[in-house]
Image: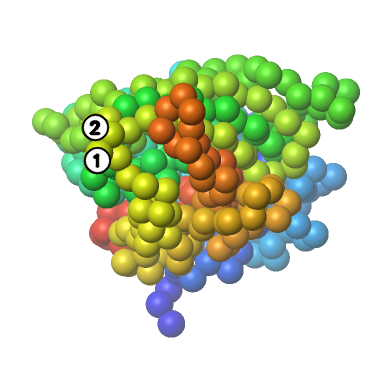
Amino acid sequence: MQKKIPVGVLGATGMVGQRYIYLLADHPWFEVAYVAASPRSAGKPYCEAVQNRWLIGSDIPAGVSELIVGDANDVSAAAGKCAFVFSALEMDKESIKALEAAYAGAGIPVVSNASANRWTDDVPMLIPEINPEHLAVIAEQKKHHGWDKGFIAVKPNCSLQSYMIPLFALERAGYPVKRMIVTTLQAVSGAGYPGVPSFDMIDNIVPFISGEEEKTEKEVLKILGSVKDGRIEAARAPVVAAHCNRVPVIDGHTACVSLEFDLPDEKKPALAEIERVWTSFRALPQELSLPSAPLSPIIVRHEENRPQPRRDRDADKGMAVTVGRLRPCPVFDIRFVALSHNTKRGAALGGILNAELLKAKGFFDGLY
């Protein structure tokens, strides 16, 4: 049996960090060998540090329970214990940016969930089915900083993951999109723990999530962008207008999308062609059979009342996007509803898939 790669989790006591630990428990390639969090948790066994705060599953994985929590600010403590780290840090952006750079500078690659480096133009913001070619900027990133083995790669915001793969599938099939209106219905788990107060969420919808609409509208363009001169140049289309709402659902972000194709009417795809594009879509993670990749990235439902979070969020390991209610739009061209699991595809399992892609492409060679 091939030896597993030892990995670390920064921010291990938080909700996303816990999700990483839970999902990595039986991973075929990786095993958690190091956990780190804030100074107040450092020095404690992990089970003690998360006592009464373990939120994922019934029990802490046995291999992690007794690990001593390190101080995430002490980069040297991770040296020799892990080949790379998953970053689920919960700090201000500038502090995260500096700390992730410190790990990379110490020769420890960082696979991040944090937003701090999403707009750094030599940091790839990955959805592996869409933009694996953005990994090419890592060489320039390392050269720019003088890093030998370390680097930073990030995943995008969870709010756009429900519709990005369907959008890209259409673009790849030759049906470019000019503009979109997106209304997201976002689960409370996206706000972390303890998150939004229960009094604000029960019997209520909150039509504002700080920074979410800006992320939704901008990140689409970087993901669809291209690599030029060692940097990622954002795409110019589609134009996205977003309405982001917090709703009383535990897990699963839903997006209601209306879009217009950048094509003359006679070249716009029929609904049957759109469904064919979606159901047949496969990409590099499927070709490489990455462990966390869904077999079918896009699942199309035909029931008039699907997708629904409780019924569809866990489709194909929680990594598939479920699309339904595809129909004509009287304002633009088409409209549909899409759903993804925000704490799996949109958070920790999406980060794990990024790491699997990096491993498959040789970025961790020589580190373990």
Q: Which quadrant is home to the C terminus?
A: bottom left
Q: Residues within 10 Å of mark 2 (few under 14, many from 20)?
A: few
Side of 313 where 350 appears, left or right:
left
Foreground residue among 316 and 243 = 243
Q: Is residue 294 visible?
A: yes
Q: Which residue is mark 2?
A: 264
Distance Cα–Cα, label 2 vs label 1: 6 Å
The reply to whether the C-beta atoms of the residues labelled 2 and 1 are less than 8 Å apart is: yes
Identify which residue is drawn at 86% across, 29% down: 202
Q: Amino acid at mark 1?
A: Lys
Q: Residues within 10 Å of mark 1 (few under 14, many from 20)?
A: few
Q: Which residue is mark 1?
A: 267
As helix, strand or loop, the secondary structure at mark 1 comes to helix
Identify which residue is drawn at 82% across, 25% down: 204
Identify which residue is drawn at 45% across, 63% down: 296
Indicate the position of residue 194 as horizontal and vertical percent values.
77, 31
Q: Amino acid at mark 2?
A: Pro
Disc number placed over residue 106 in the picture, else none: none
Indicate the position of residue 242 as horizontal and vertical percent values.
51, 22
